[in-house]
Amino acid sequence: KQEVTQIPAALSVPEGENLVLNCSFTDSAIYNLQWFRQDPGKGLTSLLLIQSSQREQTSGRLNASLDKSSGRSTLYIAASQPGDSATYLCAALYNQGGKLIFGQGTELSVKP
Amino acid sequence: GAGVSQTPSNKVTEKGKYVELRCDPISGHTALYWYRQSLGQGPEFLIYFQGTGAADDSGLPNDRFFAVRPEGSVSTLKIQRTERGDSAVYLCASSLASGPYNEQFFGPGTRLTVL
């Protein structure tokens, strides 16, 4: 069964800290992996998309890596800010159609 | 430019009633997706359209759920004989085309509450 897992479910860090969010997937035959941010009561905002042939993608203070062989992806956030507080979701694409399999999310709180 | 929009933003209904949820994708996007998100969980796939046709409806939980996209743009998710377990946030997403090279862009969701 294709599953995506995110641990921990919640994380609290002081402002300015660098942090890593983890995502694991059970089947290495993914087409891509996407990271999203969700603010309370809102929809999802796409952050980064990594194709299966890529190892990492960067956007500003965010860096996402992908290791298919170990079934893991990480989202690195540099110099965290209170505005980064949100739930972060990863999702894997296992077929060519577009059906994303999501993890449960990690709720991040950055304290001033 | 305009993103994905969904109406209504909130819908409260009684058990057994029929509801329709609407999604307006980003203009020019040919692929459209519906997901459902329960509290504290990640979204779960329901159905996706490429153009007017449902390309994958494997996530629809039962035959009370149905979705259409008659002109290849706006889509409506229809739920018959609603049950309390249907309460969730229903999210719509669109992408330029289906497939692994296309990011999915999400709308704000419709929060459905079945009393």
Image: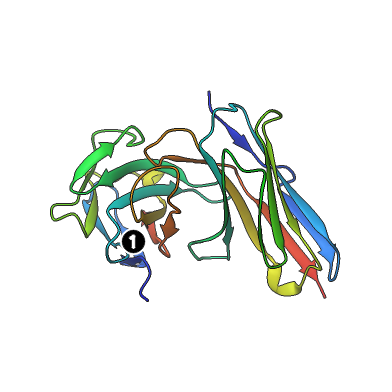
* Category of crowding for the residue at label 1, using alpha-carbon neighbours closer than 10 angstroms: few (below 14), some (14–19), many (at least 20): few
Q: Residue at x 26, y 37 (%)?
A: B55
Residue that extends furthest to the top in the rendered view of this protein: A1
- Give B100 or B89, whichever is nearer the viewer: B100
Quarter of image, res A51: top right
Residue A92 in sight here:
no
The picture places residue B56, in percent across and down from the top left corner, at: 30, 35
Quarter of the image with the N terminus of chain B is bottom left
Q: Residue at x 49, y 48 (%)?
A: B38
Residue A13 in sight here:
yes
Q: Is residue B35 left or right of residue B54?
A: right
Q: Is residue B48 left or right of residue A84?
A: left
The picture places residue B64, in percent across and down from the top left corner, at: 24, 38
Circle 1 marks a residue in which chain?
A: B
**Amino acid at pointer 1:** Val
Say if A85 sits above or below A94 in the image: below
Q: Residue at x 40, y 48 (%)?
A: B35
Say if B34 sits above or below B2 in the image: above
